[in-house]
Amino acid sequence: MVNQFLKVCAKRDYAAAHELVTDDLEYQNMMLPPVVGKQAMSDTCDMLLSLCEDSEWLVHHEVAQGDLVMNERTDRFLKDGTWVDLPVAGVFHLRDGLISSWHDYFDLQTAMTGLFPEGFPS
């Protein structure tokens, strides 16, 4: 479930992503405030992914216990013809077979330096 969700989100297929989450999904990139709901998740993902031409999220390790899933992955972003790799740890909670919360942890400086090597545009 979580791996399928990550694949469709990375490709901006939010209709497919909405089928895998609860209506009251809580989503948070730990650098941003949490958002609640399917559309808020899509809007946040779309805003972040609009910084690049393409993305893929590669899961390296995953553990699950009950309704908790945690993964270690590399989120890759294609920007200006170059892939930028970002190490990420994700924590997902499921409820009734759907993802009810998604929290991603990563180093903001690593992300900004990779995506904006010349400095963040003003």
Image (cartoon, rainbow, N blue to C red):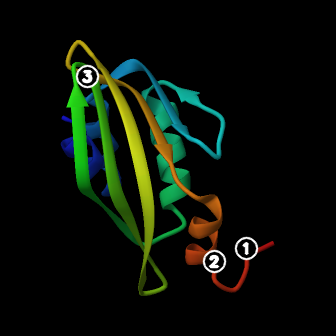
Q: Are marks 1 and 2 in contact (CB under 8 Å)?
A: yes
Residue extending farthest to the right is 122
Could you tell me the amino acid type at mark 1?
Answer: Phe
Which label is found at residue 116? 2
Q: Disc 3 designates what residue?
A: 98
Which label is found at residue 120? 1
Give residue 53's position: percent from left, percent from top: 42, 72
Could you tell me the amino acid type at mark 3?
Answer: Leu
Please, what secondary structure does the residue beneath circle 3 have? strand
Spatial CA span between label 3 and label 2: 35 Å
Give residue 90's position: percent from left, percent from top: 40, 43
Residue for point 45% across, 66% down: 86
Would you call the spot at circle 1 few (<14 residues within 10 Å), some (14-19), or many (20 or more)? few
Residue for point 65% across, 42% down: 32
Q: Are marks 3 and 2 in contact (CB under 8 Å)?
A: no
Quadrant of image for the N terminus: top left
Give residue 66's position: percent from left, percent from top: 22, 19
